[in-house]
């Protein structure tokens, strides 16, 4: 259950934060996706890592947040579906292999 919680936290907190920060102070646009900014992506990563770190080991939270950040930045699909799926798969893989 902790893996699902972490994946949902990454989606909810990260996506909301990246939108707010990106619209407010996002000046440097990402290459290949000009509607998104480095500032929004960085805030997605930081908030997602902190949130997921409350549910799973920190290494898994770090990699899940990183996977969610990359998915959010470059996903051609609806990122609300892709983010928790990709993050959850990365966290699951790490936990079952190393913890």
Image (cartoon, rainbow, N blue to C red):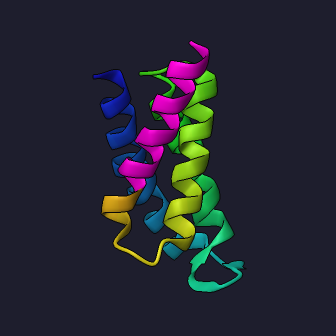
The furthest residue to the top: 99
Q: Is residue 48 found left or right of 3 in the rendered image? A: right
The spot of residue 71 in percent (x, y) is 52, 61
The residue that appears at 50% across and 75% down in the rendered structure is 23
The residue that appears at 72% across and 78% down in the rendered structure is 28
Compared with 10, 23 (above or below) is below
Quick one: quadrant of the C terminus? top right
Quick one: quadrant of the N terminus? top left
The spot of residue 6 in percent (x, y) is 39, 33
Quarter of the figure with residue 65 = top right
Q: Is residue 15 found left or right of 58 in the rendered image? A: left
The spot of residue 40 in percent (x, y) is 57, 64
Compared with 25, 12 (above or below) is above
Q: How many marks?
A: 0
Compared with 57, 6 (above or below) is below
The residue that appears at 60% across and 71% down in the rendered structure is 25
**Closer to us: 26 or 52:** 52
Q: What is the magenta range?
A: 83-99
The furthest residue to the left: 1
85 within the magenta span: yes
97 within the magenta span: yes
**Closer to us: 74 or 95:** 95
The furthest residue to the front: 97
Whether residue 21 is visible to the viewer of this picture, yes or no, is no
The spot of residue 92 in percent (x, y) is 45, 30
Q: Main secondary structure of the magenta part?
A: helix
Whether residue 2 is visible to the viewer of this picture, yes or no, is yes
């Amino acid at each position: 259950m902790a893996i699902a919680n972490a994946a949902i936290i990454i989606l909810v907190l990260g996506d909301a934060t990246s939108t707010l920060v990106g619209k407010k102070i996002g000046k440097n646009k990402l290459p290949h996706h000009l509607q998104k900014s480095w500032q929004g992506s960085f805030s997605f990563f930081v908030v997602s890592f902190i949130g997921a770190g409350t549910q799973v080991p920190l290494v898994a939270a770090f990699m899940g947040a990183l996977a969610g950040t990359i998915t959010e930045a470059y996903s051609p699909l609806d990122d609300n579906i892709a983010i928790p799926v990709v993050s959850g798969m990365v966290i699951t893989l790490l936990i079952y292999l190393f913890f």
